[in-house]
Image: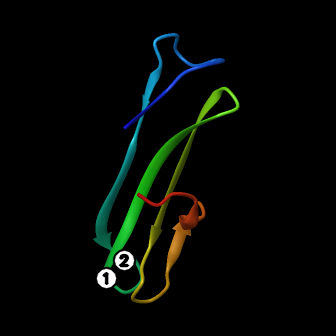
Amino acid sequence: MTRAYGGCIEPEGMELDERHDTVPCPRCEAPARSWFCERAESGSINTYSGLRCTACDYQEGDDPNDWEP
C-alpha cells in the first residue's frame, strides 16, 4: 500500500489500494491476470483496472502496462 498526501487529499493522507488476482479469461477460460490500482495524480485519486490473458492475448480496461506489481 502507498499513502498519498497533498492538495485535495485527506490531511492525514490516504491509503491507496493496489491488488491483482487470477481470474478465468472471458474469452478462452484460461487463467488471466486482473488488476486494480489507485494513483494520486494532480491532487485527485484516479483508479485504473484491467484484465490480461497471455493465452489468447485478450485484454480489457485501462492500459495493462500502466501498472505492474
Placement of 37 over or under 5, stated as above or below: below
Q: Foreground: 21 or 12?
A: 12
Instruction: Please give the label number shown on residue 25.
Output: 2
Residue drawn at (55%, 40%) of the image: 39
- Residue on which the image places disc 1: 29
Mark 1: which secondary structure?
loop
Looking at the rendered structure, the kind of residue marked 1 is Glu
* Residue 56: percent from left, percent from top: 44, 89
Mark 2: which secondary structure?
loop
Placement of 46 over or under 12, stated as above or below: below
Residue drawn at (42%, 83%) of the image: 54
Of all residues, the one furthest to the top in this rendering is: 11
Placement of 15 over or under 32, stated as above or below: above
Residue drawn at (35%, 74%) of the image: 32
Please state, as top left, top right, bottom left or bottom right, where the N terminus lies in the image.
top left
Q: Are marks 2 and 1 in contact (CB under 8 Å)?
A: yes
* Residue 68: percent from left, percent from top: 46, 61
In the visual, does 54 lie left or right of 10? left
Q: Foreground: 23 or 45?
A: 45
* Residue 28: percent from left, percent from top: 37, 87
- How packed mark 2 is, by other alpha carbons closer than 10 Å (few <14, some 14-19, many 20 or more), is many
Looking at the rendered structure, the kind of residue marked 2 is Cys
